[in-house]
Image (cartoon, rainbow, N blue to C red):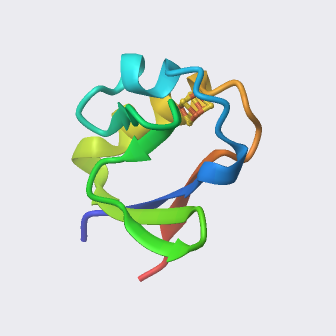
Amino acid sequence: MAKRYKVVFDRDLCIGAAACATAHPSGWEIDKEDGKANLVGGIKTGVEKFEMVFDESQYRDFLNASEVCPVAGCIVIVEIEE
Ligand code: SF4
């Protein structure tokens, strides 16, 4: 079975560096109002917390966004156990 993953975005921590949107433009966009990132298609799970499940085909892109983000813990990739 194909692996599935979850991206967990803590928007509170975001400093608007935009590295995520540059590295992975289909997954992230910069909000015109506050300059922080938005996770495209993300589901709100808390005040400034968002998550989205994705499959292996998007793994490299989301991992890349997580690695270029300068803030530790802002974009976290988790493998979903099934
Ligand atoms: S790279 Fe990290 S800090 Fe910068 S906009 Fe994206 S989520 Fe925010």
Q: Nearer the viewer, residue 46 or 23?
A: 46
Quadrant of the frame with the N terminus: bottom left
Identity of the residue furthest to the front in this view = 33
Identity of the residue furthest to the right in this view = 72
Identity of the residue furthest to the bottom in this view = 82
Kindly identify the residue that appears in the image at 50 percent across and 30 percent down: 35
Q: Is residue 46 above or below residue 58?
A: below
Q: Nearer the viewer, residue 11 or 60?
A: 11
Q: Nearer the viewer, residue 67 or 31?
A: 31
Locate residue 57, reporting x and y percent. 22, 45
Task: Please count the marks in the image.
Answer: 0
Is residue 4 something one can see in this rendering? no
Kindly identify the residue that appears in the image at 60 percent across and 51 percent down: 11
Kindly identify the residue that appears in the image at 34 percent across and 34 percent down: 29
Q: Is residue 77 above or below residue 17?
A: below
* Quadrant in the rendering for residue 2: bottom left
Locate residue 69, reporting x and y percent. 61, 28
Locate residue 58, reporting x and y percent. 28, 43
* Quadrant in the rendering for residue 44: bottom left
Is residue 78 something one can see in this rendering? yes
Where ligand 1 lies, by quadrant? top right
Quadrant of the frame with the C terminus: bottom left
Kindly identify the residue that appears in the image at 66 percent across and 45 percent down: 74
Q: Is residue 70 above or below residue 50?
A: above
